[in-house]
């Protein structure tokens, strides 16, 4: 499955000057909502993601997505995994569970996003899940914007257009780390998620001790706002993400 081609075909791979929800700027934007417009495509992507997760031995009772971006991907992933689907959303800037959503103590939860850049929103959702008694088993996204390093991608490393990106980002050791810890999310509540020794990458906010699954890696340039070369010519636009 060529994820880049699926985004291109849907007109969802945008070029310009964009403000990402992480606060960083980029000349490229993945508008997942355009891809997920077609439920059959959404289903196909979610099934592929679910297969990666299941083949890694990760168990899941519940998928939780940070709203709004992750909701459709999370819902389809939950369907493919036979799990429940909920979402966390911001109220007065704080990520929270509303709408009567509850998590049973010890439930194994996958945090699902459409796109993960630094994983900031996913981490906020993960903290809400753990505070509610859930056990975050893994992080998942349709696509990885390239700051984080995938660690649960066994079997799909040869995806067309994505080969090699793992190695160039220094992911050495992550397979062994997760392999030795077990991927079934059965370690019980860890309290604080461990981000102190982050093997995913320097700017990545995902925790050291949880696997991260994505269908593809995209290596677009990402700039800090104060060193973005595109800012000299234009203001970045926000094509429908946090705050819109
Ligand atoms: Zn800029």
Image (cartoon, rainbow, N blue to C red):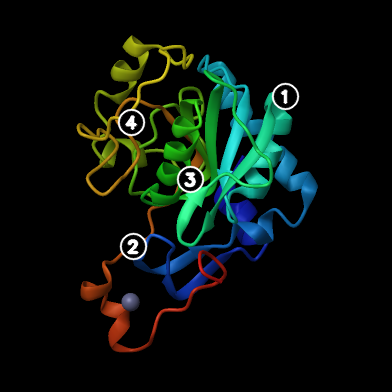
Quarter of the image where the C terminus is located: bottom right
* Res. 111 in view: yes
Mark whose residue sits in front, 1 or 4:
4
Quarter of the image where the N terminus is located: top right
Mark whose residue sits in front, 4 or 3:
4
Mark 3 to mark 2 CA distance (whole Å): 16 Å
Mark whose residue sits in front, 1 or 3:
1
Q: Which residue is mark 4?
A: 193
Name the spot of residue 57 as percent of width and height, x first.
52, 14
Nearer to us in this view, 166 or 132: 132
Badge 3 marks a residue whose secondary structure is: loop
First-in-chain label (3 vs 2): 3
Residue for point 50% across, 32% down: 132
Question: Mark 1 Cα within 10 Å, few/some/many (few <14, many 20+)?
Answer: some
* Res. 45 in view: no
Question: Mark 4 Cα within 10 Å, few/some/many (few <14, many 20+)?
Answer: some
Question: Mark 2 Cα within 10 Å, few/some/many (few <14, many 20+)?
Answer: few
Mark 2 to mark 1 CA distance (whole Å): 36 Å
Q: Quadrant of ligand 1?
A: bottom left
First-in-chain label (4 vs 3): 3
First-in-chain label (1 vs 4): 1
Q: Which residue is mark 3?
A: 161
Badge 4 marks a residue whose secondary structure is: loop
């Amino acid at each position: 499955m060529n994820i880049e081609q699926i985004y291109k075909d849907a007109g969802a791979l945008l070029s310009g000057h964009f403000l990402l929800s992480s606060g960083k700027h980029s000349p490229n934007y993945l508008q997942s909502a355009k891809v997920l417009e077609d439920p059959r495509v959404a289903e196909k992507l979610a099934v592929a993601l679910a297969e990666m997760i299941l083949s890694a031995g990760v168990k899941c009772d519940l998928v939780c997505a940070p709203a709004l971006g992750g909701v459709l991907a999370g819902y389809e992933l939950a369907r493919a995994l036979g799990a429940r689907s909920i979402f966390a959303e911001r109220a007065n800037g704080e990520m929270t569970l509303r709408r009567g959503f509850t998590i049973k103590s010890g439930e194994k939860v996958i945090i699902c996003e459409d796109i993960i850049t630094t994983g900031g929103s996913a981490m906020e959702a993960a903290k809400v899940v753990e505070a509610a008694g859930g056990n975050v088993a893994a992080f998942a996204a349709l696509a990885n914007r390239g700051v984080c390093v995938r660690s649960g991608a066994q079997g799909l490393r040869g995806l067309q257009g994505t080969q090699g990106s793992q190695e160039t980002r220094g992911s050495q050791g992550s397979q062994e780390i997760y392999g030795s810890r077990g991927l079934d999310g059965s370690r019980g509540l860890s309290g604080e998620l461990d981000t102190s020794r982050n093997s995913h990458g320097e700017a990545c906010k995902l925790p050291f001790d949880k696997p991260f699954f994505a269908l593809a890696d995209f290596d677009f340039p990402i700039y800090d706002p104060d060193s973005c070369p595109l800012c000299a010519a234009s203001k970045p636009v926000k094509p429908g993400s946090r705050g819109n």
